[in-house]
Image: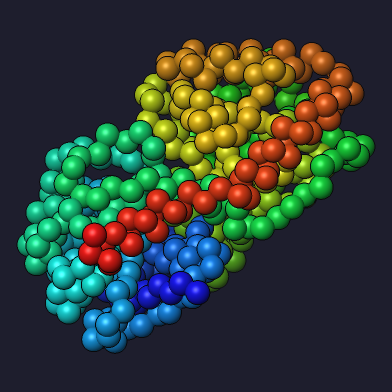
């Protein structure tokens, strides 16, 4: 059985690095702030290795550096290292200066693969910030920052050649690891709706879409959540870790002025989503007039649920999924929207598609869904069989085997 070693620091200074909450006004005085680095909770790399048949061993830095085994040292910024370097340059420089010299030495002789986990948010950098990070790594003693692995989610990010950038469809792995297998649904609950649309975190395109559904009078055909004062909808609110007890809560780390128990509420996929809805209208994180792709768990959830979906995301997202082998639904409704770069025109086309589907009866639309169960099964099986994380494994192997 293959083995991988991770070096961990019991006094990890990265995990002691904070910045103010976005909604500091609702934080308690004793709450330190928003963590700048966090242990990964979507698809922890050690868990991903285990899922691929590896034996995972963890050692402290001194033990790892003293041994003969090559090892991985993982840094997991929140949201990503380039944003943090722009927003909090002094804190980032100070915390990187605390990296153990033994670890720097192991990186330089390729005993250690240093991995910066940038997959949790969309790539949002310019090469100037990359150059600053490159110079920071040189300053702390890393001889060749090109050997530092930076894992990114966006498959078409225009990154520089300063680092070893490795693309990982990280949320595809994360949803697969949930390990659920829902049976194909041919019996929906009596009160099922045509459309499911979950919008826990407020974003402009989500608001615009839900307002348009209201304006064309089809909200009654939706089960939806919408965290908004003008149009509050709460279909799945109870599935999130929202609590009112301030003594046991903290502000959300995202865009929501709300107290929560834990930011780890991304994996809420109750069976009711499948039993009470026909089509999943996915409102992805980005919806911009640009082609930079960033596909999160939101897109892969309907595949796990074996549901058809309409995707509010950046142009080309459906086309990219098709290149991975997934099947989409242009034989069931128009997917012309995926080719429209302008975000406003793309939204108009998606609204048009949803409005057209709303004119069908529940029974008619249900029949369309049931007649395409083979596609839903195909997508589920492909999701469970793909291993996009192998890009990361290969990059780490090349470092620690000194290729």
User: Which residue shows up at 51% across the image and 58% down it?
Assistant: 42
Left or right position of 216 against 50: right
Q: Looking at the picture, does residue 367 appear above or below residue 186?
A: above
User: Which residue shows up at 20% across the image and 40% down it?
Assistant: 160
Most foreground residue, 241 or 112 = 112
Residue 205 position within the rendered picture, expressed as x and y whole percent measured from the top left:
50, 27
Residue 194 position within the rendered picture, expressed as x and y whole percent measured from the top left:
78, 28
* Quarter of image, res 177: bottom right
Left or right position of 131 against 113: left
Q: Is residue 257 shown to the viewer in this render?
A: no
Q: Looking at the picture, does residue 110 appear above or below residue 148?
A: below
Residue 261 position within the rendered picture, expressed as x and y whole percent measured from the top left:
56, 64
Q: Is residue 44 shown to the viewer in this render?
A: yes
Most foreground residue, 118 or 380 = 380
Q: In which quadrant of the rendered image does the C terminus lie?
A: bottom left
Most foreground residue, 39 or 152 = 152
Residue 245 position within the rendered picture, expressed as x and y whole percent measured from the top left:
59, 66
User: Which residue shows up at 25% across the image and 70% down it?
Assistant: 112
User: Which residue shows up at 75% across the image and 43% down it?
Assistant: 273
């Amino acid at each position: 059985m293959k083995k991988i070693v991770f070096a961990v620091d019991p006094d990890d200074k990265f995990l002691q690095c904070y910045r103010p909450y976005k909604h500091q006004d609702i934080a308690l005085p004793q709450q330190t702030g928003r963590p700048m680095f966090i242990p990964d909770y979507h698809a922890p790399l050690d868990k991903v290795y285990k899922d691929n048949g590896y034996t995972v061993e963890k050692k402290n830095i001194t033990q790892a550096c003293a041994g003969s085994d090559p090892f991985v040292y993982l840094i997991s910024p929140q949201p990503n290292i380039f944003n943090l370097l722009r927003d909090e340059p002094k804190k980032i420089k100070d915390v990187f200066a605390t990296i153990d010299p033994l670890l720097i030495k192991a990186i330089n002789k390729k005993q250690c693969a240093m991995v910066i986990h940038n997959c949790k948010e969309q790539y949002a950098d310019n090469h100037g910030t990359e150059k600053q990070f490159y110079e920071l790594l040189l300053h702390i003693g890393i001889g060749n920052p090109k050997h530092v692995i930076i894992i990114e989610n966006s498959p078409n990010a225009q990154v520089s050649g300063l680092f070893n950038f490795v693309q990982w469809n990280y949320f595809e792995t994360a949803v697969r690891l949930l390990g659920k297998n829902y049976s194909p649904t041919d019996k929906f609950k009596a009160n099922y709706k045509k459309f499911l649309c979950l919008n826990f975190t407020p974003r402009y395109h989500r608001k615009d879409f839900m307002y348009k559904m209201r304006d064309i009078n089809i909200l009654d055909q939706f089960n939806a959540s919408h965290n908004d004062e003008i149009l509050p909808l709460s279909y799945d609110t109870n599935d999130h870790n929202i609590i009112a007890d301030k003594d046991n809560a903290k502000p959300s780390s995202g865009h929501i002025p709300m107290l929560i128990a834990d930011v780890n509420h991304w994996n809420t996929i109750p069976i009711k989503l499948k039993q009470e809805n026909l089509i999943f209208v996915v409102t992805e994180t980005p919806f911009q007039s640009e082609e930079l792709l960033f596909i999160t768990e939101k897109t892969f959830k309907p595949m796990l649920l074996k549901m058809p979906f309409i995707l509010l995301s950046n142009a080309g997202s459906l086309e990219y999924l098709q290149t991975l082998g997934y099947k989409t639904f242009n034989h069931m409704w128009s997917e012309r929207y995926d080719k429209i770069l302008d975000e406003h025109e793309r939204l108009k086309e998606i609204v048009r598609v949803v409005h057209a589907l709303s004119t069908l009866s529940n029974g008619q639309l249900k029949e369309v869904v049931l007649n395409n169960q083979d596609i839903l099964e195909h997508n589920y099986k492909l999701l469970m069989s793909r291993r996009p994380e192998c890009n990361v494994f290969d990059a780490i192997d090349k470092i620690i085997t000194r290729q």
